[in-house]
Amino acid sequence: MAGPIKKIRMGYIEGAIFENERTYNGKKGTTYSATIGRRYKDKGGNYQSSNSYSRTELLQLEKVAERCGNEIDLLNESRRNGNDDRYDE
């Protein structure tokens, strides 16, 4: 899988948007998806991921999720205006 086409970060919370090639009803197209998580360094200095959030991080997660959704909407709108062969999921 290719890396994200865009990253959105707020504090320790990071959202990543991915472009996905799919086939629907025999037609190839592109959809977008997002992953959201919390990254931190452990005592050894190694990066770790977590799906546990403090209250403050939950508020950040909400904002990152909204921004990811907005970015996906913009990507879909942009490609629709370009008349390419991508489709919405």
Image (cartoon, grey):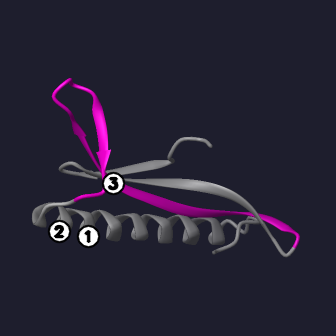
**Residue where numbered disc 3 is placed:** 37
Q: Earlier in the sequence, mark 3 or mark 2?
A: 3
Say what secondary structure mark 3 lies in. Answer: strand
Say what secondary structure mark 1 lies in. Answer: helix
**Residue where numbered disc 1 is placed:** 62
Q: Quadrant of residue 88?
A: bottom right
Say what secondary structure mark 2 lies in. Answer: helix
**Residue where numbered disc 2 is placed:** 59
User: Callout 2: 10 Å neighbours few (<14), some, many (20+)?
Assistant: some
Please state the horizontal and vertical placement of residue 58, each as a whole percent of the image: 19, 66
Q: Measure the C-alpha gap from mark 3 to mark 2.
A: 13 Å
The residue at 33%/71% (across/down) is 66
Position of residue 2 relative to residue 44, above or below, is below
Please state the horizontal and vertical placement of residue 47, each as a whole percent of the image: 29, 33
Which mark is drawn over residue 10? none
Please state the horizontal and vertical placement of residue 76, each as a whole percent of the image: 57, 69
Q: Which residues are magenta?
A: 26-52
The residue at 53%/62% (across/down) is 33
Q: Earlier in the sequence, mark 1 or mark 3?
A: 3
Q: Nearer the viewer, residue 38 or 31?
A: 38
